[in-house]
Amino acid sequence: MTTAHRRKAGGRARTGTQNYDHLVKLILIGDEGTGKSSLMSRFCDQHFSYSYVATIGVDFKIRTIEADIDGGPPAVVKMQMWDTAGQERFNSITKSFYRGAHVLVVVYDVTNRESFRHTTKWLTGCLDVTGNAIPTCLIGNKCDLARIRQVDKEEGEAFAEKYGMYFAETSAKEDLNVARVFEEMAARYVKKVRAETDVARKAAQTGTQAVGHHTINPAEDQDYIDGAGSGAGCWQLMFNKISQAFSFKSKEEVPSAASASASSAASASAAATAAAAATATAAMQLAAGEIVKQMSRAP
């Protein structure tokens, strides 16, 4: 596959001696004893240990794979896998490794209902650090132990659907679904990166820039983009939205305190309305200015 082909597909061209297209930091979280270390060892080393040793702090392994991407060329993905300790006493240590994560995998033990109850705590605790924009996965491990199962597959599927997660049941011991899950999460991350690259490319071609969920034109809203000047661009955008909400067709239709006071025919109620509108306008302009200042300080 050529470099040009990768660029066309939205991938990242390799540079220098780099032998992969994407570097993915994947975090494994969940209660102690759910099999996170076994899943990682099975995937990275094709090894399963029957002896249990609790993870102290974090463990780390690397595996490079070729991920198949629907509708595009495959991508070589170097996966950094971080296995975090499930014990409460290590929380302050493990949370520091959440930062910069590209993929999140929450693991519970299908033979331990308590570990399933704790998945919400693990998920929200990690997303508080990473944000909600990363691919997430829920794994029900030890599905080979059907006779002592405490959590039905349907329960895991319902939880994953509720939070928009990919779901699978696995067995690190029997090597069931392990590679498929991690390869799927790598593919989802690559598709996300390619989609974001396509959006940025289209914005550059049309002369617009995306700020959050709002696409703006630099020529019209320069103050909104870089926070320069009085913040007029940001203010105008806010004013337009507010005017639409109150069915004002244009800025001129908002009563002006100056025009109301200058008109001897204006009634007392009209003057009061105009004064209130002027006060609200000034307040919103001040708020808009503060927003612009915050944007200019944002990284």
Image (cartoon, grey):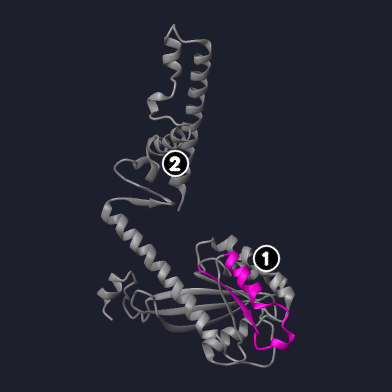
Residue occupying the point 42% across, 67% down: 192
Mark 2 Cα-neighbour bin, 10 Å: few <14, some 14–19, many ≥20 = many
Q: Residue 261 or 92: which is nearer the viewer?
A: 261
Q: Could you tell which of marks 1 and 2 lies nearer the N-terminus? A: 1
What is the spatial separation of the Cα atoms under label 1 and label 2, in whole angstroms?
35 Å
Residue identifier under label 2: 292
User: Which quadrant is home to the N terminus?
Assistant: bottom left
Q: Which image quadrant is residue 118 in?
A: bottom right
Residue occupying the point 46% across, 47% down: 297
Q: Under tag 2, what secondary structure? A: helix
Query: Is 44 situated above or below 215?
Result: below
Residue occupying the point 66% across, 70% down: 119
Mark 1 Cα-neighbour bin, 10 Å: few <14, some 14–19, many ≥20 = few
User: In this rendering, would 238 be left or right of 117?
Assistant: left
Query: Is 140 situated above or below 194?
Result: below
User: In this rendering, would 207 be left or right of 81?
Assistant: left
Residue 146 painted magenta = yes
User: In this rendering, would 75 be left or right of 93?
Assistant: left
Instruction: Tell me where residue 22 appears, x and y as whole percent.
Output: 40, 75
Disc 1 to disc 2: CB gap under 8 Å: no
Residue identifier under label 1: 121
Instruction: Tell me where residue 109 appears, x and y as whole percent.
Output: 68, 80
Q: Which image quadrant is residue 141 in?
A: bottom right
Residue 149 painted magenta = yes
Q: Under tag 1, what secondary structure? A: helix
User: What is the magenta range?
Assistant: 135-163
Identify the amino acid type marked 1.
Answer: Lys
Q: Disc number at residue 48?
A: none
Identify the amino acid type marked 2.
Answer: Val
Q: Residue 187 or 279: which is nearer the viewer?
A: 187
